[in-house]
Amino acid sequence: MAAFFSVGALALAAPRANAVGAVRLTLAPAALEVELLRVVGFSSGFASGGVAEPVRFTVPYVAVRGLVRRGRMLYLALDPGVVAPYNRFALARFTADPAQALTRAYLARSLSRWVSYLVPLPFGALLGLLAPATLVSGALGRASLAVLAGLAAWAALRELVAWQSWGGPLSDRSRDALELAMAERLGLLPEPAAALDETPFPLGAARSLSRVREAPEPPPPALPARAIFAVVAAAAFAVAALSIAKRLGDPAAIPPAVETLQSGLADAARRTHESVAPDVPEPTIAKAAERPRCACMRAASPLWKDGVPALAILTFAGDDDIASGAVAKEDRDGTPRFDFDLVAVNDGARPLRDVRITLTFARRNKSGRRVGAVDRGLFWSGLLAPGHAVKWHVRAPGSEMRIDASVTGTLDDAALDPAPPSAFAELTRSRYRAVRVHGARMLAYLHDPRGREAALALDGRTPEDRALLAQIARAASPVIACEPTLTDDRLSICVFNGAAQPRSGLELRALPASAPRFPIEGNLAVHEGVRLDVPFEGALPEEWAVVTPGDF
């Protein structure tokens, strides 16, 4: 048996205790020595400081009335006839220096408790807001991620509070050692294995037992299940946070669009078509197969000859106007004034933050000089999502106007992809006809068949409107032409079939309709294109159409 065993602890407020503060227990061979360092009467929570002088007294082991463990707390009860007034202790946070640990434990526990209350909510909200769309989508998904992240942070921080309250594994080990040593001195442990003394003894005399070794040291206590759970939860939380940070920092790799067209579907469709349509002349198919292959991402059209702006500015007068723009009109006094609607559309795949538009209005005097310049500012605070639009109504005096935006240039200039087709399809359901036309135009730019449907659903009230809608419908047709080049009076152009079935008997026409026409021999397989090389004289047209003879 060890001669002395000493350990410090904190006495906490509990239903079975009548003292709180710092206590040191020394287990001597003959008696238990109790040193009250900073002890006060029972109160809720920790004692913030000692109000009594240190007191040391000795208690016989026979005066120990109880030694019981409840969870992480060790209850020690002494005979009230021997020790008064402090004789029932609820001990926790076992340490070598209980007086210093008392202040540290109180401050650390208070700080960690406040952190566990304040941190989870903003942390979860921030994580839900910054999570990429590839991980969560919609308000419900982001709210669910925020709640889960907040709960995980709260659980981890509450485990930190418990750690600060109870002292961690080192405190648990000291508590178990104190309990074992106290039980041994109280005679509550079984006698260890002993060997017979080899000294000869008289017949009938009692054998004497001699202890050959001390009881082995108890194994270190296993890590509590709660601590294991906290460590695993913290590790999982750290891995998830690093994964989200990596996904936020690394843009998703976009495969080349042309490669996705080389899937072998065309060969299968060609074989199927050859088997069900044997009347196609073999020499014509052979000629078509000998032409170079190509692919079109979009039709050659004057709609985007200058590129697609990253931020499109639409001006129109009234809900049913398509593209009349902003035109000044004279009021009753003869003063020219503007009265129009302005819509800004984010055509790019990246959100735009804090969009600013400056309108400068002015008029001309009799000598033609520009006078009376007035600036009006339009501002959209926050994020403008890809494919989304915002609208303002503008009234101002003046006969001419200039528009300056905080976002300039085209998608190609900014190396940006267009917004997803679903966003532009949503624009085709807007109450404003000009916005519906822009959605159809962008769907045609992406060669989405919904662009043709939206353009045909819109009725043009003026010849200009009808011409614009016809251009959009042609650009969104299943079979389109792109990449025209003119070299030495030879036209090289790609004709691409984006339909779900092979096409034949087609004709390539340059617009206007009086331009030359070129028949396309053979079949165009599904999602395949062929490059034509034909003689051509004159200037290169801006628009081409692939039609069936007799369409127009």
Image: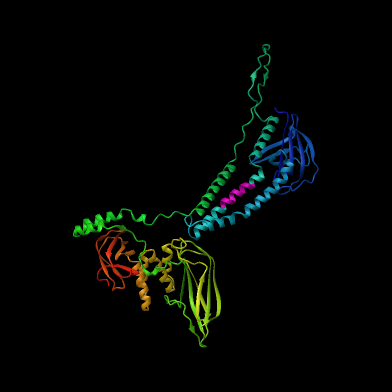
* Image coords of residue 326 (percent x, y): 47, 78
Measuring 61% from the left and 47% from the top, which residue is drawn there?
A: 159
Measuring 48% from the left and 61% from the top, which residue is drawn there?
A: 350
Q: Nearer the viewer, residue 305 or 237?
A: 305
Measuring 28% from the left and 74% from the top, which residue is drawn there?
A: 514
Is 176 located above or below residue 464 in the figure? above
- Residue 422, quarter of the rendered image: bottom left
Is 379 located above or below residue 240 in the figure? below
Residue 478 in sight from this viewpoint: no
Secondary structure character of the magenta stretch overall: helix
* Image coords of residue 8 (percent x, y): 72, 38
The mark total stands at 0
Is 110 located above or below residue 279 in the figure? above
Q: Position of 422 compared to 128: left or right?
A: left
Q: Quadrant of the N terminus?
A: top right
- Is 152 contained in the magenta span? yes
Q: Nearer the viewer, residue 517 or 464?
A: 517
Residue furthest toward the right?
Answer: 53
* Image coords of residue 427 (percent x, y): 43, 68
- Is 491 contained in the magenta span? no
- Residue 117, quarter of the rendered image: bottom right
* Image coords of residue 18 (percent x, y): 74, 44
Q: Nearer the viewer, residue 134 or 208?
A: 134
Q: Nearer the viewer, residue 172 or 263?
A: 263
Residue furthest toward the front?
Answer: 488
Residue furthest toward the bottom?
Answer: 333
Q: Quadrant of the C terminus?
A: bottom left
Residue 439 in sight from this viewpoint: yes
Where are the magenta residues, as a range? 151-161
